[in-house]
Structures are given as structure tokens and as C-alpha cells.
Image (cartoon, rainbow, N blue to C red):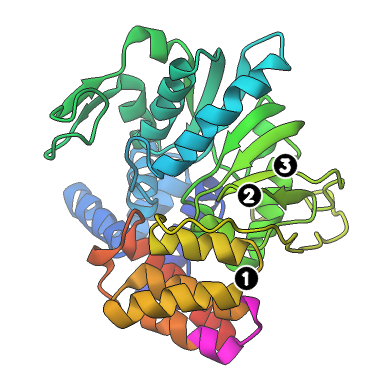
Amino acid sequence: MTETALVARLIDRLLVPRIGHPPGNWPRRVYEVIERMAEAAGIDPVQLLNRALAGESTRLGDALVDAATVGHTSFFRHAEQFAELRTRLPALAKKRRRPLKIWCAACSTGEEAYSVALAAEQVSVDIQILATDVNPVAIEIARVGNYHSSRPGRVPGTPTSRSWSAPPRLKARISFAVASIVEPDALLGPFDVIFCRNVLIYFDRDDVAEILAALSELLRPDGMLIVSPADAVLPIPTCLARSNAAGFLKPSGEAPMSARWALPNRPTTVRPPVSVGAIPVVAPQNLGEPPLVRAARLIGAGDPNGAELVLTDLLNRDPGHISGWFLLGEALLQRDERAQARAAFLRASRCDPGRAEDVDGQALRRAALSRATALGA
């Protein structure tokens, strides 16, 4: 085994139990952290990783999780979903005699959790939020709650605001913790609302239904599981149903049949495999929607043909649109056109990741390459 292959194997052993899934290839920045820390310690990368695996250093593990995870986030990301949330929260709150319990999974540096707290405050709904992420560096930033932007209007406040600090009243409603979305047993459910946005799309497509099924077991029967418009194009288990709002899922009444998501080398109780199905819903036409949101809505509603028309028009105008090619691959895959889907994913993997909209372009490119590789097998 070459040293490069050994380092990759040791990274798997160190990170997979913490992150919950291995990507096709670890980001280059993971190797850069290892090289920098090995040089500072005066040892080679293999020795450094073996020391971390022996429990001699948590600093390296934390730094590698920070380098390996997607950290792209912002306040009120996908504004249309927060508008829908404000509409739905009061009705849900009327059914409870206690604050609504909300879980923000994969919360990164906390902007989503604070956005949810602000949205609930705007409609006078009492909530308690658990916000988790596998990245301890991100969680520490979230706990501090101080945010700065080089561009005005990207933080709460006025249209000219460039900085914002979470007030004590909001911090009191949020508990931040280091945890993975693939270890839901460690959390205190059930929840009225679960946010799991802009993370599922980076997992292998075949794993998504299993993860969602496990999350659904922590959701109340009349609760909401909210994924991003891009995540909504992925398969969902039959224990969840789509609604007419992009990314809003609800329990279908069918009991989850998934095997518990299990980390590698961890014993698990085996259950029958999850059944995956799309429950068609009417995708309301909104000509004011951005093309990507509309395409994701159409795919989620079981209309890949309509999504293809939207995406083809977008890609004719902008041939280098990485997110457009990725969603086109998902639309073609829904029609079982595997060769064409593979070609679309390959095009996405060759696009400039710096031009991605509202997602981590590097992670999206890796996900596209992973899907193309799987389709070529």
C-alpha cells in the first residue's frame, strides 16, 4: 500500500465515525491540514494520523472535520421557505401546550438556527431549538453568535447592516451541540419541526431515503421535516409525503421501515430495507420563482419533463451553470435515463464550482462526480 493510499485509509478511520459517511474523495483542504500539522510536529502524516486514532490528539480530528464538512450557509437562506414557515408555525403552535421543539440538523455556524428563532418571534410562537453539527469549530462560532459580512444586508437588522450579534433572548431558546444527522438516537425527540437543509444532496443518492426514514422517527405525526429545494429532488421514503411547498415533507402515516443508519463497524439491528417512492403532488406554477427552485419543485412533484424544460432553457442561456446540470441529472435519473443522467452529472463535475448558487460548489462537484461514477459502474 502506498503512503498516499494509507493516509486516505487512516483519514477514513478517523473521520467516518464522526461525520457518518465517506465522500468519493476527501477535499484537498483535508490533506493540507494534515501536511501542515505534521510539519509543525516534525513527524510524517501517517504518524500524525495514528496518534490521533490512538486518542492522543483531538485537535487534529476537530481540524479535519472542519476541513471536510460543508460550511456554506447564510441568514434566512431560501427566503420562500421561511415565508412558508411563518405561515405554518402559528397553526402548529395552537395544537401544543408547550413551546414547539425544533431541530436544526447540520446547522453549521448557526445562521439557520437564529433565523428560525427570529421567524418564530415574528409570528409570536414560543419555540425551543436544538441546533447540531458535526463540526465543533462551527458550533463554537454559533454559540458566540457574532456575525460580520463584507456586503450590507446579509445579516439581520437594516438593509445596510454589516454585523449582528445574537441577543440573549434568542440564545436562551437555542441549544447548540456537536452531533451528526446520522446519529438521531442521541437526540431528545420527538420534534415538531426538523430542518435538514443543504446537506442531503452531498450524500450518496442511495443513502438519502435511509437517512430521512431515520429522521422521520423523531418527528411528531403532525410535524414538518424541511429540506432545501435542491434536496427535495432526492428520493424520499414512503413514511414521508411531499407537500405543495418546496422542501416541506410530512409524515405519510406509513411506519418507517428503515434499518437504523449505522456508522461503519457499529452493531445495528437489521430491519427490512426501506421502500422508496415519490408521492406526486401538484406543483403550483409560480412564474416569479427562480429557475432552480421551480425545477426542484417539479422534480419533487414527479414532473421531470417539466423540470427538464426549465433547466434546458437555463442551460442554453448559461452553459456553465453547475447547479443546473446537477438538477438536470436528477431529472433524467427520475426518468431512468441513466446514460443521459451520467452525462449531465459529468458536465456538472467539470463546471466552475465558484459559480454555484446557494450551495458549496466544491461539494456539489464531488457529489456530481460520485453520481456519474456510480452510473458508469
Q: How many discs appear?
A: 3
Res 264 label: none
Pick the front one: 186 or 204: 204
Residue at (48% x, 41% y) in the render = 81
Residue at (54% x, 43% y) in the render = 196
Check disc 1 and report the residue beneath it. 303
Whole-Å distance between the Cαs marked 1 and 3?
25 Å
Amino acid type of the residue that numbered disc 3 sits on in the rendered structure: Ser
Q: Is residue 38 above or below residue 192?
A: below
Q: Are marks 1 and 3 in contact (CB under 8 Å)?
A: no
Q: Secondary structure at mark 2?
A: loop
Pick the front one: 101 or 292: 292
Give residue 31's quadrant in the image.
Answer: bottom left
Pick the front one: 45 or 269: 269
Residue at (38% x, 54% y) in the render = 68
Residue at (23% x, 22% y) in the render = 157
State whether residue 17 appears in this view: yes
State whether residue 26 appears in this view: no
Task: State which quarter of the image contains the C terminus.
Answer: bottom right
Chain-order first, disc 1 or disc 3: 3
Q: Secondary structure at mark 3?
A: helix
Whole-Å distance between the Cαs marked 2 and 3?
19 Å
Res 216 label: 3
Check disc 2 and report the residue beneath it. 244
Q: Which residues are magenta?
A: 334-342
Chain-order first, disc 2 or disc 1: 2
Q: Residues within 10 Å of mark 2 (few under 14, many from 20)?
A: some
Magenta stretch: includes residue 338 = yes
Whole-Å distance between the Cαs marked 2 and 1?
13 Å
Magenta stretch, overall SS: helix
Residue 23, how many percent across, how many down?
A: 48, 64
Amino acid type of the residue that numbered disc 1 sits on in the rendered structure: Asp
